[in-house]
Amino acid sequence: MPTMRAYNRTALQTDNRCWERRAVGKVIAVANQKGGSGKTTTVRSLSAALAELGRRVLMVDMDPQGSLTEGCGVRPYDLQSSIYHVILGRCRMADVLLEVEPQLHLAPTNIHLAAAELQLVPATRREDKLRQALRPVRDAYDYILIDCPPSFGLLTVNCLSAADSVLIPMTCDYYTMLGVRLLLETVDDIQREVNPSLVLEGLLPTRFDTRTLHAREILEQTKVALGPRLRIFEPVIRESVRFKEAPIRAQSILTYAATSDGANAYRSLAKEIDDGQAHFGA
Ligand SMILES: Nc1ncnc2c1ncn2[C@@H]1O[C@H](COP(=O)(O)OP(=O)(O)O)[C@@H](O)[C@H]1O
Ligand SMILES: [Mg+2]
């Protein structure tokens, strides 16, 4: 049985008291149109690792399947209000936030968000809804990580439009590697048409199976083909059953298997991203 938790709504402070390092929180969209590439796991693990570094982090669940929400121990169907209501302008972002851990908040979702994809079509500036919704809370966080849906629809456009950078988790198999090229083209389109300041954070190889030659070959090919264009993070995230077990306990890998390779790999990633962004927005 999954562990379910009753979280308190956050008493969000949007003033600048805790704000010494940056003017505004950095928004990172974790995106890959392929399901199973490790987006949700990366958002959960990297957010926990950034929080462990003392950063204030918000996770935004933009995938209507709500895996991130459930993995934090929140029953999607029990939600009175969610990111769906926020996107449609029915409530404010600050009204839906839940405190998952100290310094780590969640904007939860459920399947209603799938309807927003259609409901937004006639709206003006329909690609801009998430960015507008995040604006009033950005000051309260160092990082905002968005768990994107596994598609190229309007919800994903909203995620990329709201983001400062895109982090791409990628499993090391052939079709996924081909899919990353498509994603990079989409990022180009978004930069050109919607969000000129969007940058590539980098590519994170996930679920890496050290035993197979195929995974190593794909990683090498990816480095050759994409290395000149975007940072490929190391260490890679290895396949480990711990990642599958942690969400059942409503935990991140950082607490569930605190000393595991997987937890340490996400700690390294958090440190690298945080070191690289020391003066972001200042
Ligand atoms: N490094 C890993 N090792 C083993 N399983 C993983 C790893 N990363 C993710 N998973 C598992 O793989 C599945 C897909 O991962 P997920 O993060 O949900 O991908 P996405 O959000 O891109 O669909 C989930 O069951 C998750 O628990
Ligand atoms: Mg997911």
Image: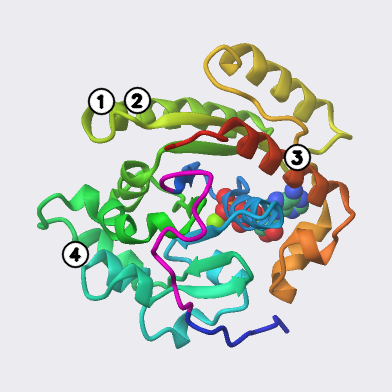
- 65 vs 253, nearest the viewer: 253
As helix, strand or loop, the secondary structure at mark 2 comes to helix
Q: Which mark is residue 192?
A: 1
CA gap between label 2 and label 3 equals 28 Å
Q: Which residue is mark 4?
A: 119
CA gap between label 2 and label 4 equals 26 Å
Q: Which residue is mark 3?
A: 268
* Number of residues whose C-alpha sits closer than 10 Å to that of mark 2, classed few (under 14), some (14–19) or many (20 or more): some
* Number of residues whose C-alpha sits closer than 10 Å to that of mark 1, classed few (under 14), some (14–19) or many (20 or more): few
Which label lies toward us, 2 or 4? Answer: 2
Q: Which residue is mark 2?
A: 188
Instruction: Give coordinates of residue 54: x percent, y percent.
Output: 66, 55
Instruction: Give coordinates of residue 264: x percent, y percent.
Output: 82, 46
Instruction: Give coordinates of residue 106: x percent, y percent.
Output: 51, 68
Residue type marked 1: Arg
Asked whether residue 89 is in view, the answer is yes
Residues rendered magenta in the picture: 10-24
